[in-house]
Image (tube, helix red, strand yellow):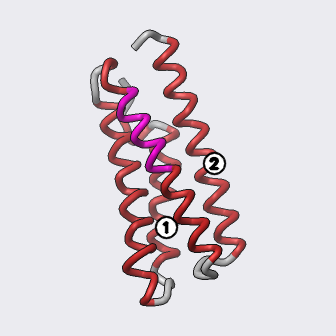
Amino acid sequence: MALFSNLPVYKLGYDVLLEIYNRTKSFPREFKFTIGEKMKEESLNMLINVYKANKSRDKTRTKYIEIARRNVEVLRLLLRVAKDLMILGIKGFVFLNTKIEELSKQLTAWQKYMTRAGN
């Protein structure tokens, strides 16, 4: 079992978390405490679930990976809402969406690996 902080999926998730915290600072007050907080919460929960997946036994690992994947999809939805409400610019949306897509691929690959390994 690798240190969770050395996992590529954790590193990318941590970068996404920091980027979301930095970008939501500039959200208008009306959205900072609704969509902004939800984005922060989902990204933090995703990172916690990656940690739990890494630290859990093989039998429960896929459960945490699946929950992390759900967190990523909710985050993707919230990003889209922020873009459509013109809270988040197109460049920020594309940047974050690209990172989230990469994160989703890593989580999916990890889940497939665990399934193939029979865990």
State which region is magenta: 62-72
Give the x, y percent position of residue 91: 71, 72
Q: Secondary structure at mark 1?
A: helix
Mark 2 lies on a secondary structure that is helix
Instruction: Classify the position of the N terminus by image quarter.
Output: top left
Q: Nearer the viewer, residue 89 or 8?
A: 89
Under mark 1, the amino acid is: Ile
| Residue appearing at x 54%, y 22% in the figure | 112
**Residue that mark 1 sits on:** 20
- Prevailing SS of the magenta stretch: helix
Please tell me the numbered disc located at residue 88. Answer: none
Q: Amino acid at mark 2?
A: Glu
Residue 26 percent location from the top left of the image: 50, 84
Q: Position of residue 59 (x, y in %)?
A: 32, 18
Residue 64: within the magenta?
yes
The residue lying furthest to the bottom in this view is 29
Kindly identify which residue carries mark 2. Answer: 101
Quadrant position of residue 58: top left
